[in-house]
Amino acid sequence: MSVLLLGGSPSVSSSGARLLQHVGDKLALHGHRCHTLQVRDLPAQALLHASFDDPAIVRATALLQGVDAIVVATPVYKASYTGILKAFLDLLPQDGLDGKLVLPLATGGSQSHMLVLDYALRPVLASLSARFILPGIYATSDQLRWNAATGLTLDAPIAARVARGVEQLSSELFALPQRRQQAQHARHSLAA
């Protein structure tokens, strides 16, 4: 099964990008193929002018359409997810996440923004017809420590939530083929 790691941070060295990569590494250990798309690497002009036919936007959308699940990560800015992530999501068709499993991640400076996943990001993901949106994972900067020599260290509560999120996403991914087969069988039964 394939997973898109969708980064919504404008910063190259953000804690959210590091958490996203950490989750991707854990999913790879479960046998999933992970692809990374950092929205900041897409042409700003194409994002701001909603250039659906821009070659980079077309490739990014095709990459998203070709995966079974998406792990989307964003820092919290002004009590919401980032504008560049919103600009990219706005370029997707209304059913752009149809059939996709989604694991949302967010990072912020304090616990006061932890509901951003539920009140800001989840409704947008749902409006794009995501098949199943898993419980989000929110972490503060203090819970994610970076050291160039040792890499990313997660506080125990966040490490436990990440482990549960990865396990749940992996389980859902492995169950997808059977669910798709059952849905197809049900459609054929109704047609007969």
Image (tube, grey):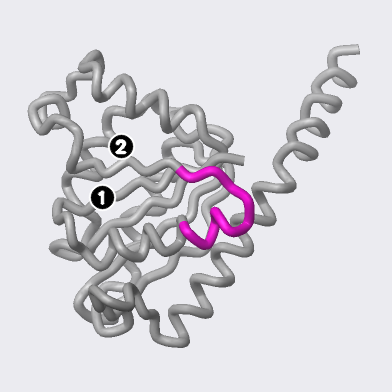
Q: Position of residue 3 (x, y in %)?
A: 51, 43
Furthest residue in direction front, as rendered: 149
Residue at 44% over, 51% down: 71
Report the quarter where the C terminus lies.
Answer: top right
Q: Which mark is residue 89?
A: 2
Neighbourhood count class around disc 2 (C-alpha, 10 Å): few under 14, some 14–19, many 20 upward:
some
Q: Position of residue 18 (x, y in %)?
A: 31, 63
Residue at 36% over, 26% down: 61
Could you tell me which secondary element the residue under label 1 belongs to? Answer: loop
Report the quarter where the N terminus lies.
Answer: top right
Furthest residue in direction bottom, as rendered: 156
Q: Which residues are the magenta region?
A: 25-34
Up/down of 10 relative to 157, above or below: above
Up/down of 44 relative to 119, above or below: above
Q: Which mark is residue 8?
A: 1
Residue at 52% over, 35% down: 67
Q: Amino acid at mark 2?
A: Leu
Q: Position of residue 79 (x, y in %)?
A: 19, 65
Neighbourhood count class around disc 1 (C-alpha, 10 Å): few under 14, some 14–19, many 20 upward:
many
Give the image quarter of residue 14: bottom left
Q: In this view of the protein, which residue sits in the foreground, 7 or 88?
A: 7
Image mark count: 2
Q: In this view of the protein, which residue sits in the foreground, 54 or 124?
A: 54
